[in-house]
Image: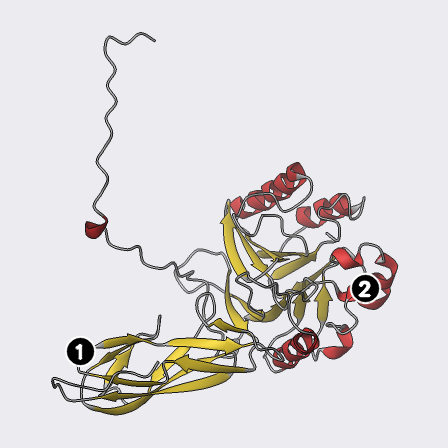
C-alpha cells in the first residue's frame, strides 16, 4: 500500500465535567424472592462453599450452620451445593437439610471419590424437575477428563437426549474465570471451550441454559455466548477480597404471556447475617437536603462487617412518606417536610432502623452525628 500523504489526528481529551456518570449496572434477573413460588415455578437454593479461610474458628463453624438453618426456612424444593462436602467435617450434608441435597464434587473430594459416592450418590448425575434438567458434573480436578474419563461420553449422551426446555449445569470448578468472564476456569482451556460451544448450540436451538459454579469469593453473573454463568463463593471467605457469606435463591418460571417460548431464571443473593445496622443512624436535615444511608451486615461469629449493596437486595422503607422519600435502589433519603420519621432497611431476614428529623429552614442547625 502506497500513501502520498498520511496524517494522524489525535482527538482532544473529553471534558469529564460534561460526561454524565454511567448508571450502576443492575442485572434484571436479580430480583427479590420474597413471594413464595407460584404454580409451575421451581425454586431451589444454591450454596457455594469450600474452605472457609481467613476468619476465626467460631465463624468457620457457624457459617455452615447458619446457612443450613436459613435455607431450611426457605420454600425451596432442593439445594445445590458446589463446595467440598467430604472435605468439611462440619459442613453441609444430606441429613442436615429438610429437602433433597445435591452436591458437586470439589477439590477436597478428588482423592476420595468412593466416600463421596457412598455418602452423596453417583457422580456425575442428572435429574429432572418440571421443565428443567439438572446436570451435576465432577470437576474435583478442574475439568471433565481429569476428574473422570467417562464424563464426556455421559455428558454427550445427556445433552443429546434433553427434551426439557431448561438446562442447568452444576460444577465446582467454574468453566469461566470468575473475575473476567473468560474461558479460563479449567486446566484445559480447549475443554472449557468445547463445553461452552455445546451449551451455546443448545441455546441457539431454543433451550435456556445456565451454569452454576463455585467461586473464590462474592457473587458474579456472566453471560457468555447466550449462556448464563452464576459463580457463587457462598460460605467461602478470604481476607481482603469482596467476599460476603451468602446463598442464592433461584427461581425458574414460565415466561410471561406474549414473550418467546424460553423459560427464564431469576435469582436473589441472600447474605448470611448475625445483625445489620445503618450509618448514620441519627440524622437532621432541612427540606430539600439528601443523605445516603448505608446498611452493613455483620458475619455470624465474627467481628467482620461488609456493606449491604448490589448484588444483594436491600429493602428500604420509610415510616412517614410525608417527611421525605427513600430511593429503594441506593438508600438515599430526600427531606421534604419538617417532622421525624424512621427509615428501615431489611436484608437477610433482619432489620435495622435509622431515625431522621427534618427541621424547619433556618440559619443554624446541629451537625449530624458521625
Residue 1 sits above or below residue 45 on the image: above
Q: Tell me if 8 is positioned left or right of 88 in this view.
A: left
Structural crowding at the residue carrying mark 2, measured as other residues with C-alpha within 10 Å and reported as few (<14), some (14–19) or many (≥20): few
- Going 52% across and 58% down the picture, which residue do you hit? 220
> In the image shown, does 127 or 370 lie closer to the viewer?
370
Residue under label 2 = 121
Mark 1 vs mark 2, foreground winner is: 1
Q: Position of residue 110 (x, y in %)?
A: 80, 54
> In the image shown, does 161 or 177 lie closer to the viewer?
177
- Going 55% across and 60% down the picture, which residue do you hit? 241
Residue under label 1 = 288
Q: Position of residue 177 (x, y in %)?
A: 58, 48
Q: For residue 118, which numbered disc appears in the image? A: none
Q: Tell me if 369 is positioned left or right of 265 in this view.
A: left
Residue 6 sits above or below residue 14 on the image: above
Q: Secondary structure at mark 1?
A: loop
> In the image shown, does 121 or 308 lie closer to the viewer?
308
Q: Position of residue 131 (x, y in %)?
A: 60, 62
**Dot placed on the residue nearer the N-terminal end, 1 or 2:** 2
Quadrant (top left, top right, bottom left, bottom right) of the N terminus: top left
Residue 61 sits above or below residue 266 on the image: below
Q: Secondary structure at mark 2?
A: loop
Q: Quadrant of residue 172?
A: bottom right
Which colour assignment does the render follow?
secondary structure
Q: Position of residue 63 (x, y in %)?
A: 65, 75
Q: Tell me if 310 is positioned left or right of 240 in this view.
A: left
> In the image shown, does 95 or 296 lie closer to the viewer?
296
Amino acid at each position: 500500500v502506497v500513501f502520498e500523504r498520511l496524517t494522524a489526528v489525535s482527538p482532544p481529551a473529553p471534558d469529564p465535567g460534561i460526561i454524565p456518570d454511567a448508571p450502576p449496572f443492575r442485572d434484571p434477573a436479580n430480583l427479590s424472592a420474597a413471594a413464595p413460588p407460584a404454580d409451575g415455578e421451581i425454586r431451589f437454593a444454591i450454596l457455594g462453599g469450600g474452605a472457609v479461610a481467613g476468619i476465626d474458628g467460631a465463624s468457620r463453624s457457624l457459617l455452615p450452620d447458619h446457612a443450613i438453618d436459613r435455607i431450611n426456612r426457605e420454600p425451596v424444593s432442593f439445594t445445590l451445593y458446589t463446595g467440598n462436602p467430604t472435605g468439611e467435617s462440619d459442613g453441609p450434608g444430606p441429613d442436615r437439610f429438610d429437602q433433597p441435597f445435591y452436591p458437586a464434587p470439589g477439590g477436597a473430594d478428588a482423592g476420595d471419590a468412593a466416600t463421596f459416592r457412598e455418602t452423596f450418590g453417583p457422580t456425575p448425575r442428572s435429574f429432572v424437575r418440571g421443565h428443567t434438567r439438572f446436570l451435576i458434573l465432577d470437576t474435583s480436578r478442574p475439568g471433565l477428563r481429569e476428574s473422570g474419563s467417562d464424563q464426556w461420553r455421559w455428558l454427550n449422551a445427556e445433552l443429546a437426549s434433553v427434551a426439557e426446555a431448561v438446562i442447568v449445569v452444576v460444577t465446582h470448578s467454574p468453566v469461566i474465570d470468575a473475575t473476567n468472564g473468560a474461558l479460563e476456569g479449567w486446566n484445559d482451556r480447549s475443554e472449557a471451550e468445547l463445553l461452552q460451544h455445546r451449551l451455546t448450540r443448545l441455546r441457539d436451538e431454543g433451550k435456556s441454559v445456565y451454569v452454576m459454579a463455585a467461586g473464590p469469593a462474592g457473587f458474579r453473573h456472566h453471560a457468555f455466548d447466550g449462556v448464563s454463568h452464576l459463580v457463587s463463593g457462598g460460605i467461602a471467605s478470604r481476607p481482603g477480597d469482596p467476599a460476603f457469606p451468602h446463598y442464592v435463591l433461584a427461581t425458574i418460571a414460565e415466561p410471561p404471556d406474549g414473550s418467546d417460548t424460553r423459560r427464564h431464571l431469576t435469582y436473589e443473593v441472600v447474605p448470611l447475617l448475625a445483625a445489620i445496622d445503618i450509618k448514620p443512624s441519627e440524622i437532621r436535615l432541612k427540606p430539600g437536603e439528601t443523605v445516603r444511608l448505608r446498611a452493613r451486615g455483620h458475619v455470624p461469629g465474627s467481628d467482620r462487617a461488609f456493606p449491604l449493596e448490589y448484588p444483594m437486595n436491600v429493602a428500604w422503607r420509610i415510616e412517614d412518606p410525608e417527611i421525605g422519600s427513600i430511593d429503594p435502589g441506593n438508600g438515599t433519603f430526600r427531606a421534604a417536610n419538617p417532622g421525624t420519621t424512621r427509615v428501615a432497611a431489611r436484608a437477610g431476614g433482619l432489620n435495622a432502623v435509622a431515625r431522621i428529623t427534618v427541621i424547619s429552614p433556618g440559619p443554624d442547625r446541629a451537625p449530624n452525628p458521625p
